[in-house]
Image: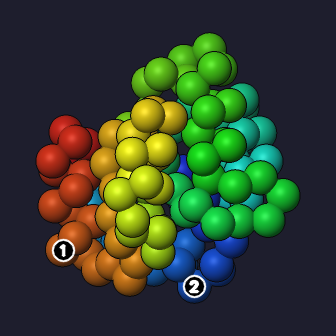
């Protein structure tokens, strides 16, 4: 079973993502910010990360840069899931190591399509 770390400061978004990912047969772990997510990755590197951009403590882009430096940090498929949809943000995310980008709000169909696109399904 593949694992996905859901990183978002919104409990509702984490709950929705968790439900969808469980339906897609993923084991999930949750983090409220980038710092918690980094600790989770140090314990056990996930197969995928669903990542929000704007969060307290450590934002998504800083987390992504730090995670990619960790042993095995090049392994997870990272899908940014955010309201930031301008080309500058998207380019910055891809340059920092994101594999894909989806907009909030998302649904099961969108998440499934993106995860298929990046080879997770």
Determine which of the numbered discs, if any, sits on residue 27 in the image: none
**Residue found 40% across the figure and 77% down from its top:** 104
**Discs 2, 1 touching: Cβ within 8 Å:** no
Q: What is the count of numbered marks?
A: 2
Examine the rendering and report whether any part of residue 45 can be seen: yes
**Residue found 54% across the figure and 18% down from its top:** 72
Q: Which residue is mark 2?
A: 12
Q: Quadrant of residue 91?
A: top left
Q: Is residue 45 above or below residue 61?
A: above
Q: Quadrant of residue 22?
A: bottom left
Q: Mark 1, residues whose alpha carbon is within 10 Å: few (<14), some, or many (≥20)?
A: few
Q: Secondary structure at mark 1?
A: helix
Q: Secondary structure at mark 2?
A: helix
2 or 1: tag closer to the N-terminus: 2
Side of 75 relative to 35 (left or right): left
For the view shown, which residue lies furthest in the right direction?
57
Where's residue 8, x and y in %?
61, 66
What is the quadrant of the N terminus in the image? top left
Q: Mark 2, residues whose alpha carbon is within 10 Å: few (<14), some, or many (≥20)?
A: few
**Residue found 61% across the figure and 33% down from its top:** 65
For the view shown, which residue lies furthest in the top direction?
71
- Taking depth in this image into account, of 22 and 54 the one nearest to the observer is 54
Q: Which residue is mark 1?
A: 109
Mark 2 → mark 1, Cα distance in angstroms: 18 Å
Side of 23 relative to 60 (left or right): left
Where's residue 110, x and y in %?
22, 70
Where's residue 30, x and y in %?
63, 60
Where's residue 39, x and y in %?
77, 39
- Taking depth in this image into account, of 59 and 21 the one nearest to the observer is 59
**Residue found 27% across the figure and 65% down from its top:** 111
Q: Is residue 111 above or below residue 67?
A: below
Side of 88 relative to 61 (left or right): left
């Amino acid at each position: 079973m593949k694992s996905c770390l859901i990183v978002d400061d919104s409990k509702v978004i984490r709950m929705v993502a968790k439900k969808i990912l469980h339906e897609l047969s993923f084991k999930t772990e949750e983090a409220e910010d980038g710092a918690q997510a980094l600790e989770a990755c140090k314990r056990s590197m996930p197969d995928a990360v669903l990542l929000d951009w704007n969060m307290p403590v450590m934002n998504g882009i800083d987390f992504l840069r730090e995670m990619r430096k960790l042993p095995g940090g090049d392994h997870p498929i990272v899908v940014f899931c955010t309201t930031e949809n301008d080309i500058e943000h998207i380019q910055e995310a891809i340059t920092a190591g994101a594999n894909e980008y989806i907009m909030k709000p998302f649904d099961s169909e969108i998440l499934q399509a993106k995860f298929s696109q990046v080879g997770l399904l």
